[in-house]
Image (cartoon, rainbow, N blue to C red):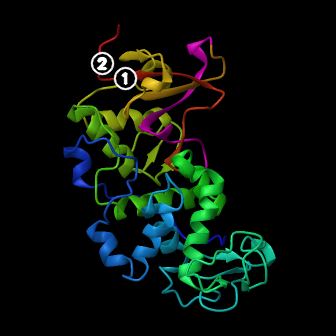
Amino acid sequence: MKKLLIAVPLVMLLLLGLLLGGLAMRIIGGGPPSQSAMRDIPPDYLPLYQAAADTCPGLPWPVLAAIGSIESNHGRSTAQGVTAGANFAGAAGPMQFGIGGKAGNTWGGLPVHQVPPQVGYGTDGDGDGIANVYQPADAIPAAAKYLCANGALRGADIPRAIFAYNHADWYVTKVLAIASSYAAGPGVALPAGPAVERAVAFAFSQLGKEYKWGAAGEDFYDCSGLTQRAYSKGGVTLPRTSREQWYFGARVLNPDELQPGDLVFFAHDLTDPATIHHVGIYIGAGNMIDAPHKGAVVSMRPAIGRGDYIGAVRPTAAPA
């Protein structure tokens, strides 16, 4: 897919329901559209996003819609390749599928369409016998198929699926930020208590801000600076470094018992907490929000399954 040279947004609005709710929902739900989505998404595109996401269990339709927003402003862009031809990288259509050149041929078949679709991700979504990359009814289901094949199935790894669509961390962050604004409900399952709710809400609001070693906001963070600042919003004072934070609160021994708001830690030696080198805020579904490293931005990334995962702490619970 095409790689746009645009700035990463520094803030993301989080719905009020995130602070007041407590309902068990996915990170980005597949429910009704928010007012922002209704204003931004053309009425003929919205049902296409929703129906296409339904073909991939676990893929929230707002994620699909956010990709359509970035790639072509839901088909409204007048840039080369959206309604005809291809852009400089060989991407075409409202979802900017590669049809040749640097972008490869992820659509498959003939450069513009295939009759019937046989290879690649080109899809005959409207049932007219032609998979046309410029037809949103074909391109949007094809994008869902692509995401599904790259980690979105059953919500296994939504960030990885988005990264497969465009290999850039800023792109993942921007898609998730837009998707969150399109969702009408609260985005995470939160345990009772305003401290955790406010900490997680703050972490979401910092997506896209730059990493800087030793920084703790407002515009720059290192990993423990982000977690410290997030919990300060909920009235909880964490120690400054990740190794100190490891000893604050109750240890969560079983990864299956992780809850949003827990701090997840990573170490060079899994038998020695003195080698902890990173911390993030768990947000559910195996993912965390963290400030990764120099040159990166605050992002939503997988937490569980990493080889350097040493364990987790629940800052609002008393130590055992």
Q: Quadrant of residue 125?
A: bottom right
Toward the left, the furthest residue is 20
Residue 273 relative to residue 43: left or right: right
Query: Could one spot residue 166 in this view of the protein?
Result: no
Residue 233 is situated, as x and y percent measured from the top left of the image, at: 26, 38
Q: Which mark is residue 314?
A: 1
Q: Secondary structure at mark 2?
A: loop
Residue 151 is situated, as x and y percent measured from the top left of the image, at: 61, 50
Q: Which mark is residue 165?
A: none
Q: Which residue is mark 2?
A: 317
Looking at the rendered image, the quarter that the N terminus falls into is bottom right
Q: Is residue 136 above or below residue 193?
A: below
Q: Depth check: 143 or 176 in front? A: 143
Residue 58 is situated, as x and y percent measured from the top left of the image, at: 49, 51
Q: Quadrant of residue 239?
A: top left
Mark 1: which amino acid? Arg
Cα separation, mark 1 vs mark 2, equals 6 Å
Residue 171 is situated, as x and y percent measured from the top left of the image, at: 56, 61
Q: Is residue 158 above or below residue 274?
A: below
Q: Depth check: 27 or 263 in front? A: 27
